Amino acid sequence: MAQSSSPEETANPSHIRPTTPAETWQALHDGNRRFMVGESIHPHQDAQRRLELTAGQKPHTVVLACSDSRVPVELIFDQGLGDIFVIRTAGHITDLSVLASLEFAVVSLKVNMVVVLGHESCGAVKAAQNALDGGELPGGFQLVLVEKVTPSLLAAKRNNEFGSDAFEKRHVREIVEHVLERSPEIQAGIQDGTLGLAGMRYRLVDGMAEPVVKLGLD
């Protein structure tokens, strides 16, 4: 006799860990759509899942996201415990520890998707814009945020891209390119088809994680 499906399995055929970049991309897309329309199923958040994870983790995606409290990564993609390895910095900026964390997820955890996630109304992008437009600089270590984000805004202006939306999208693209250039492991994964890399921008107004750039997902 066939076993009956659980509510989670019925609502989400992709409840099993996706094994290819294309499958993972589709799972993230479907989860975000559910979140947008208020139909999240909140998978992998029960006691059984917690017990399973005591044996180790096997996430399908690593996300480098902004630390903004309005951008809860697992919620906006309707994923659960153990599904996404999340790295967060203000302005989703990178340094050696961020790159090391990305490579740990790719090499040791065998994720098949890397996502750089920016968002609407990013404070770090706004601070860099204020610095360029009026010379307004933050104090203390916050200055690092401006220093890290400013090159993205300069690149946008060289491409005749202006306004906060354009700046935020350009910053996502620049971080994607930076990650790709600095990490031979990620380059190799994209080349051999075992890894996808995407840049996205989360829209606060409607909850959509809109694609900005995709690599290894054709």
Image: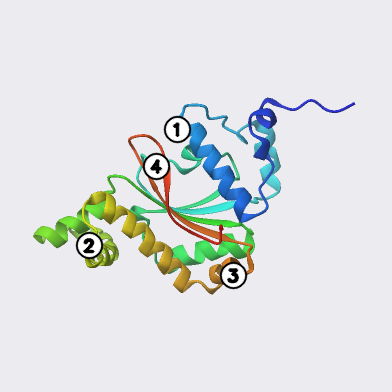
Residue bearing the label numbered 1? 36
Give the distance between the C-alpha atoms of the residues marked 4 and 3, in whole angstroms.
30 Å
| Residue drawn where x is 58% and y is 45% of the image | 26
Mark 4 in CB contact with mark 2 (< 8 angstroms):
no
Give the distance between the C-alpha atoms of the residues marked 4 and 2, in whole angstroms.
28 Å
Give the distance between the C-alpha atoms of the residues marked 2 and 1, in whole angstroms.
31 Å
Give the distance between the C-alpha atoms of the residues marked 2 and 3, in whole angstroms.
31 Å
Looking at the image, is mark 4 or mark 1 nearer the viewer? 1
Q: Please identify the quarter of the rendering in which residue 147 is found.
A: bottom left
Q: Where 183 falls versus 209 (above or below)?
A: below
| Residue drawn where x is 48% and y is 33% of the image | 35
Looking at the image, is mark 4 or mark 2 nearer the viewer? 2
Quarter of the image where the N terminus is located:
top right
Mark 4 in CB contact with mark 3 (< 8 angstroms):
no
The kind of residue tagged 1 is Met
Residue 191 marker: 3
Helix, strand, or loop for circle 4?
loop
Give the distance between the C-alpha atoms of the residues marked 4 and 1, in whole angstroms.
13 Å
Residue 71 marker: 4
Residue bearing the label numbered 2? 160
Mark 2 in CB contact with mark 1 (< 8 angstroms):
no
Looking at the image, is mark 4 or mark 3 nearer the viewer? 3
| Residue drawn where x is 46% and y is 73% of the image | 182
Q: Please identify the quarter of the rendering in which residue 139 is found.
A: bottom left
The kind of residue tagged 2 is Asn
If you read the primary sequence from the N terminus, does the residue marked by circle 4 or circle 1 appear first? Answer: 1
